[in-house]
Amino acid sequence: MYTNSVFHALLFLPASSLTCMYISDTSFEKGLEKKRGWRRMTSSLDLLSALCKHLDNLWEEHRGSVVLFAWMQFLKEETLAYLNIVSPFELTMGSQKKVQRRMAQASSNTELDFGGATGSDIDQEEVVDERAVQDVESLSSLIQEILDFDQAQQIKCFNSKLFLCNICFCEKLGSECMYFLECRHVYCKACLKDYFEIQIRDGQVQCLNCPEPKCPSVATPGQVKELVEAELFARYDRLLLQSTLDLMADVVYCPRPSCQLPVMQEPGSTMGICSSCNFAFCSLCRLTYHGVSPCKVTAEKLIDLRNEYLQADEANKRFLEQRYGKRVIQKALEEMESKEWLEKNSKSCPCCGTPIEKLDGCNKMTCTGCMQYFCWICMGSLSRANPYKHFTDPASPCFNRLFHAVDVNGDIWEDEIED
């Protein structure tokens, strides 16, 4: 069966009745008055009522034998002639409310007064055959009823059969089993329950596939909800929504730690406005929205930005320059080069942390920032009263190493360390 270009394979059909469409009375009702002296039929219900009466007569004529084929032959080849329909006509659906109103009027046997006339002007409505009344409001609802009936019968048939679970290898009734909709592989509910719970606790909500190797079928949320507890299903639902939103390019999350709600981003814009806390932020740097100004780069991101820029191709480099600004990136590159050089050629003051480069002289150093004395070898702070005691005290780790590794007249001075 096809509905809206979708094919449905039905295994069961409900009990059905043969039904004719309402016939419009607007295109041929005048011709009915002129032929065979028929009284003018005021609506399609009169026509269908007449058909019902004639079908009853055919039933009486074929009493005790199959009458369906006689009915089909009459409806197919003799209906128009029986109703004296010879002019073009159209098929329309009757109004359900109007039909109900007419049936109520006919059942109460009331007389209708047209314009206050009496006598021959009063025309009592003919009683409408109930079988001529459409009891289905729409074709879509009828199709849905057929599909629901088919599904209910399939479930009933499935629950009464025995199936072998390929996980625990036990035969169980279908009422104790569940099948995946796409592949129809069947497993017992107890095994699937344990399988789903393990995957959800591990956060693998996208991996609730059929346990059959290489089978791409996935369990529906309804099946998961049927097997696992409410608390675990809430976690599954939340993680599934989050993973789905993460795949959407136009969805970002509010950067505020207390919010973190998803925000829809306008196409071509870098501004996001959280509907919960009304925070306007840049979707690139996750900071307060800054308009056309380039994104600000924190010190922690300089290393990542430099590495990303150096490894990017031309297109990505242009994107980063547009996002952060070319001057910012150039400054990041220069600062990182300076930082690497300082780490390689200088040491930080043990007191204030100022980078210091040693060009010449002994190992007693003076910080230009805080004027603190310190040892270049062990980086320990020295006494301001007698800084050289650190190199003359036999108990000091730098004893007699004041000029250790010092360039003197082109030669490196190496102090002999006595054991």
Image: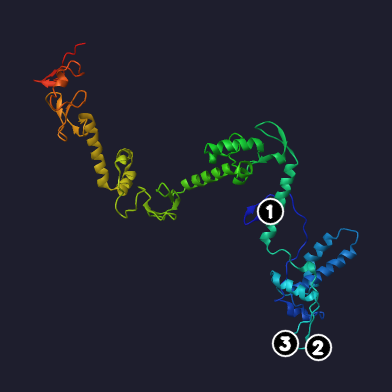
Looking at the rendered image, the disc whose residue lies closer to the viewer, 1 or 2, is 2
Amino acid type, mark 2? Gly
**Badge 1 is on which residue?**
1
* Residue at x-position 90% and y-position 65%: 61
Left or right: residue 334 versus residue 282 is: left
As shown in the figure, which amino acid type bears the numbered disc 3? Gly
Residue 92 versus residue 173 in the image, above or below = below
Q: Residues within 10 Å of mark 2 (few under 14, many from 20)?
A: few
Where is residue 319 drawn, in percent x and y?
33, 47
Answer with the quarter of the image where residue 388 lies: top left
- Measure how far apart labels 1 and 3 are at the Cα level: 51 Å
The residue indicated by pointer 3 is 115
Quarter the C terminus occupies: top left
Q: In front: 270, or 94? A: 270
Query: Can you see residue 94?
Result: no
Q: Please state which of residues 211 and 23 is positioned toward the viewer in this rendering.
A: 211
The front one of 148 and 243 is 243
Identify the residue under disc 2.
Answer: 119
Q: Circle 1 sits in a helix, a strand or a loop, which is it?
A: loop
Distance CA(mark 1)–CA(mark 2) = 54 Å
Q: Is residue 338 left or right of residue 317?
A: left
Q: Secondary structure at mark 2?
A: helix
Residue 40 screen position, x and y as percent: 77, 80
| Quarter of the figure with residue 114 | bottom right
At 80% across and 62% down in the image, what residue appears?
72
At 74% from the left and 44% from the top, the residue drawn is 157
